[in-house]
Amino acid sequence: MKRVTCLLLTLLLALLTCAALADVPAVERTMALDYAKNFSVDYCEGGYKLITISDGTRFLTVPEGAQAPENLDADIVPLQLPLGNLLVSSTPTTSLINAIGALDAVTMTTTDYDTWYIDEVKAAMDEGKLTYIGSYKEPDFERLIAAQPPFAVFSTMLLSVPDVAEKLTELGIPYMLDQSTYEDHPLARVEWIKLYGILLDREEEAEAAYAAQKALVEGIAAKETGKTVAMFYITSKGALYARNGGDYMAKMLELAGGEYVLSGMNPEESGTQQMEMEEFYAGAGEADYIIYIWSLGGKPETLADFIARNEILAEFKAVKEGNVWCTTPDFFQISNTLGDMIVDMNNMLVNEDESVDSFTYLFKLK
């Protein structure tokens, strides 16, 4: 089903692009993409660039000093460059923008100060360059009216609050839904950095940042270590959620040389699946390693803290052998360094020396 969906999305992008050719300057070339399937970019005569998102939205970047072509289709949103004074609601998107040195183009966020883990973002908020305007569910519309951002980027979570989307349209604030979370390959999520390079005139920086992450993954020597890994978290109410077999984190683990112990659970779906502890133990109790999603449920700092989440955890093979690792709390705020996380996973699997301190997004519970 996933392959059929990807083919349909690709066909949709192609059809939309063809339909757009009559409304924009002639297309000279199309951006080469390695993994990303949920956006495309056509380079047009005169420096214009047509961006097509898999949800059907289209944006035409208009070079500085130029004007938008006449008779554009109503669904094509012209974006006059350079872009600044932006509202960016998605934290992973902000990490991509930060990675290309364009954070100063973002002046509004829907993530409050105490929740951020990206140092540059907190510094910008300390300096008054970046302002929290309320959550994406209830942004401060009066401040938005006063600021009049020319463009906004939200995650697909905006779909859960259609009244907010309607209000943005009413205020005349064009917005894009970042579809990167629908990508099934971790490097595809990184590759969305190329889109923000287009929007913020940082194409070279975006290409370099993506290439560096791709090289990290390609440079991993160890493949198929034979080690199995369970990945999950437990909420404050005791509900356990394990990553689905088709989740991007399962793919990251595969690229790192490991095997996701629950790879057969919803192999065509990303995200998580709630499970009872007994059921989870039956499928993951013999896993060689555990990666606990620290930032999504509980915050264990020691192995004892971890076991306290549920007494059955003490029976897991990985717990008995001391192979329990946690993601750092900033992991889910970043998309620009997923290659580094894959390297961390590989180091976890192949390096038996506990003194190794080169990990960035994983730490071992002791």
Image (cartoon, rainbow, N blue to C red):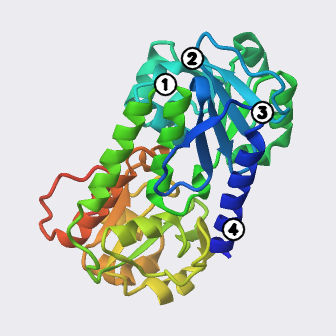
Closer-to-camera residue (304/143): 143
Is label 1 or label 3 in front?
A: 3
Closer-to-camera residue (105/24): 24
> Can you give x and y, in whole percent of width and height, for residue 185 in the image?
49, 62
Instruction: Look at the numbered discs 4 and 1 and tell me whether their residues touch, using CB distance below 8 Å.
Output: no
Q: On the image, numbered disc 2 is attached to which residue? A: 82
Is label 2 or label 3 in front?
A: 3
Q: Residues within 10 Å of mark 2 (few under 14, many from 20)?
A: some
What distance separates the C-alpha of mark 4 from that of mark 1?
A: 32 Å
Instruction: Tell me which label, 4 or 2, sits earlier in the chain.
Output: 4
Residue 239 seen in the figure? no
> Can you give x and y, in whole percent of width and height, for residue 340 in the image?
31, 52
Instruction: Tell me which label, 2 or 3, sits earlier in the chain.
Output: 3
Q: Tell me the SS state at disc 4.
A: helix
Q: Tell me the SS state at disc 3.
A: loop
Instruction: Tell me which label, 1 or 3, sits earlier in the chain.
Output: 3
Q: Which mark is residue 201?
A: 1
Is label 3 or label 4 in front?
A: 3
What distance separates the C-alpha of mark 1 from that of mark 3?
A: 23 Å
Instruction: Look at the numbered discs 2 and 1 and tell me whether their residues touch, using CB distance below 8 Å.
Output: yes
> Can you give x and y, in whole percent of width and height, for residue 19 in the image?
78, 45
What distance separates the C-alpha of mark 2 from that of mark 3?
A: 22 Å
Residue extending farthest to the bottom is 282
Q: Tell me the SS state at disc 1.
A: loop
